[in-house]
Amino acid sequence: MRKCELVVVGCSLGGMRALQSILGALPAGFAVPVAVVQHRYRNSNDALPQFLSRTSRLPVVDVDDKQWIKAGTVYLAPANYHLLVERGQFELSVDDAVAYSRPSVDVLFESAADAYGPSLAAVVLTGANRDGARGVARVKGRGGFVIVQDPKTAEAPSMPEAAIAAARVDRILPLERIGPFLVELCRSQR
Amino acid sequence: MSTEPEILTEEQQKHDLEVIEIQLLTEGIYHHYGFDFRDYSMASLRRRVWKRIYAEGLSTVSGLIEKVLHDPSCMERLLLDLSINTTAMFRDPTFYVAFRDKVVPLLRTYPFVRIWHAGCSTGEEVYSMAILLQEEGLYDRCRIYATDINEAVLQRAKTGIFPIGTMQENTSNYIAAGGKATFSDYYTARYDHAIFRPGLRENVVFAQHNLVTDSSFNVFNVIFCRNVLIYFNNALQERVQQLFLNSMEMFGVLGLGRKESIRFTSVADDYEELDIEEKLYRRVR
């Protein structure tokens, strides 16, 4: 992979605790933007970004349509929208659910892979479904880097297991090592 | 980490080439059929185009270009893919709560209210608004102009018939939206369908209108355009916001989708915020 310019993260059941762990490991001024799909209830409000802000040194926000992507910010897919990425800019859509989900991890990963190719790092965390597996295959197909939470450390192992089965992923790591590894990855790449 | 520069370059080129192909597709459609998707948001457009490519048994954007240009029925199918936005009754219930609290009192002071619902798709949110206005005793002095680019979805909207399977979600949305009656009183269940009371569309005019190419056709007290502009790029959003401003009475109300905003457009100063969370704005100049 080339110098990492965007990190995308997907999680579902058990994702809140996993996200707290990873975001908590990222230092203030982390030089790369982070975009997250956490499956959430369609009418949920600002509770999720507020909750995650408490344990992150980075600002955590729900994405507005056409928002510009800035380093050092954690962007969440808003409830009941798909989050997509173009170079430098987010897009939202209300297209049909993918893998029974809106927001869907596949939609974020596939669009990010198309837009960022080898400058993308993708992380699949705990979840009780298969969302993200197709996305991981696309990320690898476009030359990106894929990290999957070790299913043994996941509250729900099926999502990381499906990701590992879908592509030759680059790292399988226990939860507590993913945050520090991202810091290293985003520092070392040229 | 391994780096393979020549392969990566190839990946980048593949992506850039695909963007060019999609631009050729939209140019071709515009010149041959007159539908203008050239300023649609690229990531969503690409996703929808690929869905159609696979459904047609094709494997490249160029393959779709050839088929679409020579086979009008393929264009019709692509048109549906590109122009149908899924929705639900009382989508984002808190929007309707805010509308009741902050907009309905304003509308009570008007003898007659013109509402434009731009991009109404299959009509779920039009019927939602009709129900709300009826419950607030305002419907008789309202006229709703419900428009969409797509004639096929308008025909469905006009029938007021929706799949019965969606009624569970619609009912819970209705209750969360502050509904004052029993939701099932508004429709009759027949086999797989819910047929809504015809009285709800008595004051609704359904008409074809293209936000990309058509101009203003009236001035309104309220304009809704929810989760349509997300499919447009910045330049096209700007154009449509100017169209809305030109179609808006002074102190008229603009309602957008929950994650849409006028913040980055030139009309930002023409409105004040009525409810920032629910994206309700009021024209002030």
Image: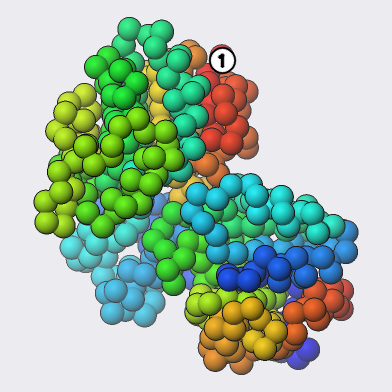
Q: Is residue B187 left or right of residue B213?
A: left
Residue A104 lies, with reference to residue B35, above or below; the image says: below
Q: How many marks?
A: 1
- Residue identified by numbered label 1: B284
Q: Is residue B119 left or right of residue A124?
A: left
Amino acid carrying label 1: it is Val
**Quarter containing the C terminus of chain B:** top right
Q: Estimate the x, y position of residue A142 in percent, counting from the top left.
A: 59, 80
Q: Nearer the viewer, residue B262 or A154?
A: A154
Residue B34 lies, with reference to residue B266, above or below; the image says: below
Q: Chain of mark 1?
A: B
Residue B217 falls in image quadrant: top left
Residue at 31% across / 11% down in the picture?
B112
**Quarter containing the N terminus of chain B:** bottom right
Q: Nearer the viewer, residue B83 or B21?
A: B83
Q: Estimate the x, y position of residue A134 in percent, counting from the top left.
A: 50, 80
Q: Estimate the x, y position of residue B6 in percent, counting from the top left.
A: 68, 87
Whether residue B32 is visible to the viewer of this picture, yes or no, is no
